[in-house]
Amino acid sequence: MFTSGSTGRPKAILSSHRNLVSTLVGQPYLPTGPDQIHLQCSPVSWDAFSLEFWGGLLHGGTVVLQPGQKPEPALVTELARRHGVTTLLLSATLFNYLTDEHPEAFDTVTTAFTVGEAASPAHVHKLQRLRPGIEVVNGYGPAEVMIFATTHTVEPGEHPHTAIPIGTPSSTRAVTSSIPT
């Protein structure tokens, strides 16, 4: 995997299979099951790809693959609407852009993640007003832990929050599994 971290320049990271398995199994933040449709729109080299791709498939859901190696907002919107996507994992920048310019991308979405950068209280509030009932999750974590170390589900409010917390630690990283590490 590669991450830009805080430098903006790609650097390689290494993470164990155990970290990936613990991200995908037994976590309350990820809606799973055969009724879930995830959109894979992250580059293959980004850790979020693992959650988008394996998060859906491992639990019997559907994964819609976006062609190419970078998310294209109009294509994300078209794929989400055409396939009835229920889960979107988006960088905060893309989350904000889609909320402003393509809110229809969230028409069928039940859970939207904003990750990778500080969540925008104004954009989260706007989306929650446009799509009542949508669950918005702020995810934070270095790529080395395989996507999230913490998550926070943002409760809707009458006004935007002053800040969106990064949340509480995800379930324990110690996974007992027959999946080889």
Image (cartoon, rainbow, N blue to C red):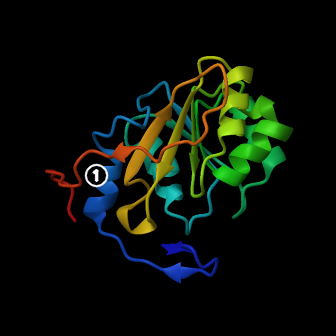
Amino acid type, mark 1? Ser
Residue 121 falls left or right of residue 82: left
Above or below 13: residue 172: above
Above or below 1: residue 99: above
Res. 114 visible in picture: yes
Count of marks placed on residues: 1
Q: Which residue does the numbered mark 1 point to in the structure image?
A: 22
Above or below 9: residue 86: above
Front one among 33 and 124 = 124
The residue positioned 41% from the left and 34% from the top of the image is 60
Q: Where is residue 78 shown, x and y percent of the image?
A: 79, 38
Q: Where is residue 24 shown, x and y percent of the image?
A: 35, 47
Extreme front residue here? 162
Q: Residues within 10 Å of mark 1 (few under 14, many from 20)?
A: many
The residue positioned 65% from the left and 19% from the top of the image is 158
Above or below 59: residue 68: below
The residue positioned 63% from the left and 32% from the top of the image is 85
Q: Where is residue 84 shown, x and y percent of the image?
A: 66, 27
Front one among 61 and 134 = 134
Residue 34 falls left or right of residue 130: left
Front one among 58 and 172 = 172
Q: Where is residue 43 shown, x and y percent of the image?
A: 62, 63
The quarter of the rendered structure image containing the C terminus is bottom left
Assign a secondary structure to mark 1: helix
Res. 78 visible in picture: no
